[in-house]
Amino acid sequence: MTAKTIDGRAIAKEVRAAVAADVAAMVAEGHKPPGLATVLVGENPASQVYVRMKHKACEKAGITSFQHTLPATATQEEVEAMVKELNANPEVHGILVQLPLPNGLDDERVLNSISIDKDVDGFHPINIGRLAQKGREPQFIPCTPHGCIHLLKTSGIELEGANAVVLGRSNIVGMPVALLLVEENATVTICHSRTRNLAEKCREADILIAAVGRPEMVKADWIKPGAAVIDVGVNRIDDPTAERGYRLVGDVAYDEANEVAGYLTPVPGGVGPMTIAMLLRNTVRAAKIAYGG
Ligand code: GUN
């Protein structure tokens, strides 16, 4: 059996269309369009690509975006001063500091300095704290984890009571996606580099979320037949036959996984587009909060 492909591009397109309609309605009511400010520190090539894609998506949805770049030599104070300025700017409803920050900068302090009402990444400790507590609503849900849940739900996959295994425990994906799955009443296991019998644990999963950043680590025999597999990994591997000299692969060995899984996200074209769609959604939400709605 071949897995059903979860088409992240198509699902993200629907979310972006809804966002664009929301923006148009907001403007028709006499408000300024929502505004997103990005802060990129240093010259990490992958981060540059992601930030560029976020601005392009904003433009398409009618969201104003402001791009701020700082050199890799920027000090902690300079980065925080920029965030402070954006906190005070009424045209900026959402602030996104692209991670990872260059070595020597303390990302926790930077994320802490973002106004909770503009934290469209959902990385502020208060937002994450609320996500971890029963009955508390975070102001914003982190984009990639929210995108994973949206892909599962849109594909009609039952989360309640499902065995979900999250491979990876990062602040950006692994931990928040595990918290969201708990909220959806899944039974969640978080696996990481010290987990014993990793393949066996993964094989128990009805839903497997791979977010470790290791190219094609998840093999066919790690997957329970029929399971839903969400591949969050985006890894560059050398490929002399490719125009750019590399190609992108996920954390899952796609071809062999495709023969065992019930549902599978491709890389690219799976989770990636959802991250951006959810960011746009959060930015509209931030503008609505600012406009008192
Ligand atoms: N780096 C990788 N993913 C993300 C994300 O969703 N937001 C930010 N700010 N940085 C990232």
Image (spheres, rainbow, N blue to C red):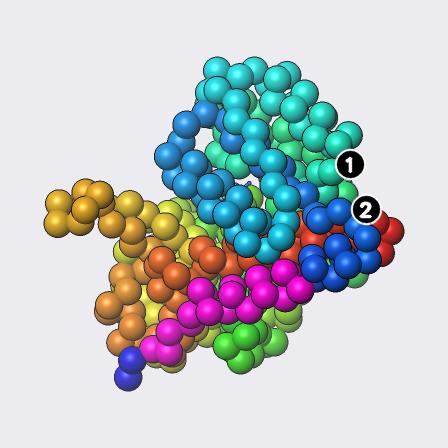
* Residue farthest bottom in this picture: 1
Amino acid bearing label 2: Ala
Q: Quadrant of residue 105?
A: top right
Q: Position of residue 267 (x, y in %)?
A: 35, 59
Q: Quadrant of the C terminus?
A: bottom right
Query: Within 10 angstroms of label 1, few (less than 14), some, or many (20 or more) residues?
Result: few
Q: Position of residue 28 (x, y in %)?
A: 77, 59
Identify the mark nearer the N-term, 2 or 1: 1
* Residue farthest right in this picture: 292
Look at the numbered disc 1 and give the secondary structure of its residue: loop
Q: Which residue is mark 1?
A: 90
The magenta region covers: 3-21
Say which residue appears at 29% left-offset and 69% top-offset.
257
Q: Is most of the magenta stretch helix, strand or loop?
A: helix
As drawn, 89 above or below 76: below
Q: Quadrant of residue 124?
A: top right
Check residue 6 for magenta coloring: yes
Say which residue appears at 46% left-offset and 41% top-offset.
52
* Discs 2, 1 touching: Cβ within 8 Å: yes
On screen, residue 92 versus residue 195, left or right, reads right
Front one among 254 and 62? 62
